[in-house]
Image (cartoon, rainbow, N blue to C red):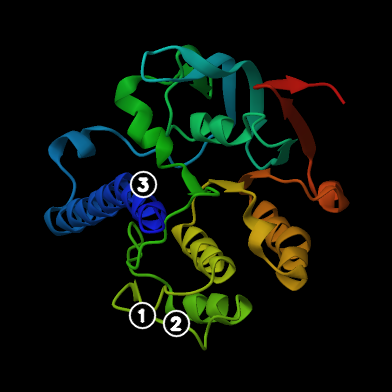
Amino acid sequence: MFIMSPFNMFVGTIPLYVKSAKAIDNIYQLEAVLDEKIKTGPTAQDLALRKIEHFEKIELKDLNFSHRDTNGTAIFTVGPIDLSIKSGELIFITGGNGSGKTTLMKLLCGLYQPDSGMIKLDDNNLEEATYSLYRDLFAVIMSDFYLFERLYGIKNPDQELIKTLLQKMQLDKKTAVVNSCFTNIHLSTGQRKRLAMMTAILQDKPIYIFDEWAADQDVEFRVYYYESLLKELKNKGKTVIAVSHDDRYYHVADRIIKMDYGQFIEE
Protein backbone atom coordinates (compact mmCIF):
# COMPACT_ATOMS: atom_id res chain seq x y z
CA MET A 1 0.00 0.00 0.00
CA PHE A 2 2.81 2.41 0.89
CA ILE A 3 4.63 1.59 -2.37
CA MET A 4 1.57 1.98 -4.61
CA SER A 5 1.00 5.68 -3.86
CA PRO A 6 4.37 6.96 -5.17
CA PHE A 7 4.21 4.38 -7.97
CA ASN A 8 0.82 5.74 -9.06
CA MET A 9 2.21 9.28 -8.92
CA PHE A 10 5.10 8.17 -11.13
CA VAL A 11 2.77 6.52 -13.65
CA GLY A 12 0.61 9.65 -13.68
CA THR A 13 3.56 11.78 -14.77
CA ILE A 14 4.33 9.63 -17.84
CA PRO A 15 1.74 11.30 -20.16
CA LEU A 16 3.05 14.74 -19.12
CA TYR A 17 6.62 13.65 -19.84
CA VAL A 18 5.62 12.30 -23.27
CA LYS A 19 3.85 15.56 -24.15
CA SER A 20 6.82 17.64 -22.97
CA ALA A 21 9.27 15.51 -24.95
CA LYS A 22 7.09 15.87 -28.05
CA ALA A 23 6.91 19.66 -27.63
CA ILE A 24 10.70 19.88 -27.27
CA ASP A 25 11.14 17.67 -30.34
CA ASN A 26 8.81 19.97 -32.30
CA ILE A 27 10.89 23.01 -31.31
CA TYR A 28 14.11 21.30 -32.44
CA GLN A 29 12.44 20.41 -35.76
CA LEU A 30 11.35 24.03 -36.17
CA GLU A 31 14.90 25.24 -35.51
CA ALA A 32 16.18 22.79 -38.15
CA VAL A 33 13.66 24.14 -40.68
CA LEU A 34 14.64 27.74 -39.87
CA ASP A 35 18.34 26.93 -40.22
CA GLU A 36 17.70 25.29 -43.59
CA LYS A 37 15.66 28.30 -44.71
CA ILE A 38 18.60 30.56 -43.87
CA LYS A 39 20.91 28.39 -46.00
CA THR A 40 18.63 28.12 -49.03
CA GLY A 41 17.21 31.65 -48.96
CA PRO A 42 13.69 32.74 -50.01
CA THR A 43 11.72 30.73 -52.56
CA ALA A 44 10.32 32.13 -55.79
CA GLN A 45 6.90 32.17 -54.14
CA ASP A 46 8.31 34.21 -51.25
CA LEU A 47 9.83 36.73 -53.66
CA ALA A 48 6.60 37.03 -55.64
CA LEU A 49 4.93 38.65 -52.64
CA ARG A 50 6.13 42.14 -51.77
CA LYS A 51 7.14 42.71 -48.17
CA ILE A 52 4.96 45.13 -46.22
CA GLU A 53 7.22 47.86 -44.85
CA HIS A 54 4.70 50.42 -43.55
CA PHE A 55 1.03 50.77 -42.73
CA GLU A 56 -1.37 53.49 -41.69
CA LYS A 57 -4.16 51.53 -40.03
CA ILE A 58 -5.16 48.01 -38.99
CA GLU A 59 -8.84 47.23 -38.48
CA LEU A 60 -10.46 44.21 -36.88
CA LYS A 61 -14.01 43.92 -38.20
CA ASP A 62 -16.55 41.74 -36.37
CA LEU A 63 -13.77 39.30 -35.48
CA ASN A 64 -14.69 36.03 -33.73
CA PHE A 65 -12.59 33.10 -32.57
CA SER A 66 -13.50 30.12 -30.40
CA HIS A 67 -11.31 27.71 -28.48
CA ARG A 68 -12.84 24.26 -28.88
CA ASP A 69 -12.69 20.91 -27.11
CA THR A 70 -11.85 17.61 -28.80
CA ASN A 71 -15.46 17.31 -29.97
CA GLY A 72 -15.35 20.68 -31.69
CA THR A 73 -17.60 22.36 -29.12
CA ALA A 74 -16.77 26.00 -28.38
CA ILE A 75 -15.55 26.36 -24.78
CA PHE A 76 -14.50 30.02 -24.91
CA THR A 77 -15.15 32.67 -27.55
CA VAL A 78 -13.45 35.99 -28.19
CA GLY A 79 -15.65 38.39 -30.12
CA PRO A 80 -17.26 40.02 -31.81
CA ILE A 81 -14.26 42.39 -31.82
CA ASP A 82 -14.14 45.72 -33.63
CA LEU A 83 -10.88 47.60 -33.24
CA SER A 84 -8.94 50.19 -35.24
CA ILE A 85 -5.21 50.68 -34.59
CA LYS A 86 -3.34 53.61 -36.08
CA SER A 87 0.36 53.48 -36.88
CA GLY A 88 2.41 54.84 -33.98
CA GLU A 89 -0.20 54.22 -31.26
CA LEU A 90 0.66 52.86 -27.83
CA ILE A 91 -2.29 50.80 -26.58
CA PHE A 92 -2.72 48.89 -23.32
CA ILE A 93 -5.06 45.88 -23.19
CA THR A 94 -6.33 45.15 -19.68
CA GLY A 95 -8.68 42.66 -18.07
CA GLY A 96 -8.77 39.75 -15.67
CA ASN A 97 -7.29 36.30 -16.18
CA GLY A 98 -9.19 34.39 -18.85
CA SER A 99 -10.78 37.52 -20.33
CA GLY A 100 -9.35 36.82 -23.80
CA LYS A 101 -6.41 39.23 -23.94
CA THR A 102 -3.81 36.71 -25.11
CA THR A 103 -6.19 35.21 -27.67
CA LEU A 104 -6.82 38.70 -29.03
CA MET A 105 -3.07 39.33 -29.33
CA LYS A 106 -2.62 36.07 -31.25
CA LEU A 107 -5.49 37.00 -33.58
CA LEU A 108 -4.07 40.48 -34.10
CA CYS A 109 -0.59 39.28 -35.09
CA GLY A 110 -1.86 36.44 -37.28
CA LEU A 111 -0.89 33.47 -35.10
CA TYR A 112 -4.59 32.59 -34.97
CA GLN A 113 -6.93 33.01 -37.91
CA PRO A 114 -10.49 34.12 -37.01
CA ASP A 115 -13.52 31.87 -37.37
CA SER A 116 -15.39 34.82 -38.83
CA GLY A 117 -14.93 38.52 -39.47
CA MET A 118 -11.88 40.07 -41.09
CA ILE A 119 -8.65 41.95 -40.56
CA LYS A 120 -8.05 44.94 -42.83
CA LEU A 121 -4.64 46.47 -43.47
CA ASP A 122 -4.97 49.97 -44.93
CA ASP A 123 -8.49 49.14 -46.21
CA ASN A 124 -7.32 45.89 -47.84
CA ASN A 125 -8.80 42.65 -46.54
CA LEU A 126 -6.18 40.23 -45.23
CA GLU A 127 -6.18 37.08 -47.37
CA GLU A 128 -4.60 33.66 -46.92
CA ALA A 129 -1.81 34.51 -49.39
CA THR A 130 -0.81 37.67 -47.50
CA TYR A 131 -0.96 36.33 -43.93
CA SER A 132 2.76 35.53 -43.80
CA LEU A 133 3.64 39.04 -44.97
CA TYR A 134 1.23 40.52 -42.43
CA ARG A 135 2.77 38.47 -39.60
CA ASP A 136 6.17 39.84 -40.57
CA LEU A 137 5.03 43.29 -39.39
CA PHE A 138 5.15 42.09 -35.78
CA ALA A 139 7.73 41.45 -33.10
CA VAL A 140 5.92 39.51 -30.38
CA ILE A 141 6.70 38.43 -26.84
CA MET A 142 3.85 36.32 -25.48
CA SER A 143 3.57 35.23 -21.85
CA ASP A 144 4.40 31.65 -22.95
CA PHE A 145 7.34 32.75 -25.12
CA TYR A 146 10.15 30.48 -26.29
CA LEU A 147 13.66 31.93 -26.48
CA PHE A 148 15.80 30.67 -29.37
CA GLU A 149 19.57 30.71 -29.05
CA ARG A 150 19.93 32.03 -32.61
CA LEU A 151 18.86 35.53 -33.68
CA TYR A 152 16.57 34.34 -36.46
CA GLY A 153 15.54 36.87 -39.08
CA ILE A 154 18.16 39.44 -38.09
CA LYS A 155 20.72 39.98 -40.83
CA ASN A 156 24.02 41.57 -39.84
CA PRO A 157 22.98 42.47 -36.26
CA ASP A 158 24.33 45.79 -35.01
CA GLN A 159 27.14 44.82 -32.61
CA GLU A 160 27.17 48.19 -30.87
CA LEU A 161 23.42 48.01 -30.30
CA ILE A 162 23.79 44.46 -28.97
CA LYS A 163 26.44 45.64 -26.52
CA THR A 164 24.26 48.57 -25.40
CA LEU A 165 21.17 46.39 -24.96
CA LEU A 166 23.04 43.74 -22.98
CA GLN A 167 24.26 46.46 -20.63
CA LYS A 168 20.81 48.06 -20.31
CA MET A 169 19.26 44.68 -19.56
CA GLN A 170 22.10 43.95 -17.08
CA LEU A 171 22.93 40.75 -18.94
CA ASP A 172 26.41 41.60 -20.23
CA LYS A 173 27.92 39.47 -17.44
CA LYS A 174 25.53 36.59 -18.15
CA THR A 175 25.65 36.08 -21.93
CA ALA A 176 26.98 37.43 -25.21
CA VAL A 177 26.14 37.18 -28.90
CA VAL A 178 28.63 35.21 -31.01
CA ASN A 179 27.90 34.33 -34.65
CA SER A 180 24.31 35.56 -34.18
CA CYS A 181 23.74 33.19 -31.24
CA PHE A 182 23.44 33.81 -27.51
CA THR A 183 26.22 32.05 -25.64
CA ASN A 184 23.92 31.35 -22.69
CA ILE A 185 20.12 31.29 -22.37
CA HIS A 186 19.94 29.21 -19.17
CA LEU A 187 18.80 32.15 -17.08
CA SER A 188 15.91 33.12 -14.82
CA THR A 189 12.51 33.78 -16.38
CA GLY A 190 12.89 37.54 -15.95
CA GLN A 191 16.35 37.51 -17.52
CA ARG A 192 15.17 35.36 -20.45
CA LYS A 193 12.33 37.81 -21.01
CA ARG A 194 14.89 40.60 -21.17
CA LEU A 195 16.81 38.64 -23.80
CA ALA A 196 13.54 38.19 -25.70
CA MET A 197 12.99 41.95 -25.52
CA MET A 198 16.51 42.53 -26.80
CA THR A 199 15.79 40.20 -29.74
CA ALA A 200 12.53 42.03 -30.49
CA ILE A 201 14.30 45.40 -30.54
CA LEU A 202 16.98 44.03 -32.88
CA GLN A 203 14.24 42.80 -35.24
CA ASP A 204 13.16 46.44 -35.70
CA LYS A 205 9.57 45.65 -36.71
CA PRO A 206 6.81 48.25 -37.24
CA ILE A 207 4.55 46.69 -34.57
CA TYR A 208 5.37 45.29 -31.13
CA ILE A 209 3.11 43.07 -29.02
CA PHE A 210 4.05 42.47 -25.39
CA ASP A 211 1.93 40.12 -23.26
CA GLU A 212 2.54 40.97 -19.59
CA TRP A 213 6.28 41.44 -20.23
CA ALA A 214 6.84 43.24 -16.92
CA ALA A 215 5.16 40.55 -14.81
CA ASP A 216 8.45 38.73 -14.11
CA GLN A 217 10.61 41.82 -13.70
CA ASP A 218 11.74 43.53 -10.54
CA VAL A 219 10.78 47.13 -9.80
CA GLU A 220 13.80 48.59 -11.59
CA PHE A 221 13.04 46.91 -14.90
CA ARG A 222 9.30 47.46 -14.56
CA VAL A 223 9.92 51.21 -14.32
CA TYR A 224 12.40 51.05 -17.23
CA TYR A 225 9.85 49.17 -19.37
CA TYR A 226 6.97 51.57 -18.82
CA GLU A 227 8.70 54.89 -18.40
CA SER A 228 11.57 54.50 -20.89
CA LEU A 229 11.40 51.54 -23.27
CA LEU A 230 7.78 51.89 -24.39
CA LYS A 231 8.22 55.63 -24.85
CA GLU A 232 11.41 55.09 -26.88
CA LEU A 233 9.61 52.68 -29.21
CA LYS A 234 6.73 55.12 -29.66
CA ASN A 235 9.14 57.99 -30.36
CA LYS A 236 10.67 55.87 -33.13
CA GLY A 237 7.25 55.61 -34.76
CA LYS A 238 6.61 52.03 -33.63
CA THR A 239 3.13 50.77 -32.86
CA VAL A 240 2.93 49.02 -29.48
CA ILE A 241 0.10 46.90 -28.09
CA ALA A 242 0.84 45.76 -24.54
CA VAL A 243 -1.20 43.58 -22.20
CA SER A 244 -0.85 45.10 -18.75
CA HIS A 245 -2.29 45.03 -15.23
CA ASP A 246 -0.01 47.80 -13.92
CA ASP A 247 -2.59 50.57 -13.50
CA ARG A 248 0.02 52.91 -11.99
CA TYR A 249 1.51 53.18 -15.51
CA TYR A 250 -1.70 53.56 -17.51
CA HIS A 251 -0.82 57.21 -18.11
CA VAL A 252 1.88 56.06 -20.55
CA ALA A 253 -0.65 54.68 -23.05
CA ASP A 254 -2.53 56.59 -25.74
CA ARG A 255 -5.51 54.30 -25.19
CA ILE A 256 -6.59 51.69 -22.66
CA ILE A 257 -8.94 48.90 -23.75
CA LYS A 258 -10.49 46.58 -21.19
CA MET A 259 -11.67 43.04 -21.92
CA ASP A 260 -14.02 40.71 -20.09
CA TYR A 261 -15.48 37.39 -21.24
CA GLY A 262 -13.88 37.78 -24.67
CA GLN A 263 -15.28 41.22 -25.44
CA PHE A 264 -14.39 44.87 -24.97
CA ILE A 265 -16.23 46.57 -22.14
CA GLU A 266 -16.81 50.21 -21.26
CA GLU A 267 -15.16 51.41 -18.06
- Relative to 244, does residue 185 appear above or below in the rendering? below
Q: CA distance from mark 2 to mark 3?
A: 37 Å
Seen at 33% across and 56% down, the residue is 153
Tell which tag, 2 or 3, sits nearer the viewer. 3
Q: Amino acid at mark 3?
A: Gly
In the rendered image, which residue does mark 3 sit on? 12
User: Of label 2 and label 3, which has the lower sequence position?
Assistant: 3
- The image quadrant where one finds the C terminus is top right
Within 10 Å of the Cα at label 2, are there few (<14), some (14-19), or many (20+) other Cα atoms? Answer: some
Q: CA distance from mark 1 to mark 3?
A: 36 Å
Q: Please provide percent x and percent y for residue 235.
A: 70, 55
Q: Secondary structure at mark 2?
A: loop
- Relative to 194, does residue 86 appear above or below in the rendering? above
Q: Amino acid at mark 2?
A: Thr
In the rendered image, which residue does mark 2 sit on? 175
In this image, 109 relative to 78: left or right? left
Q: Please provide percent x and percent y for residue 49.
A: 27, 33
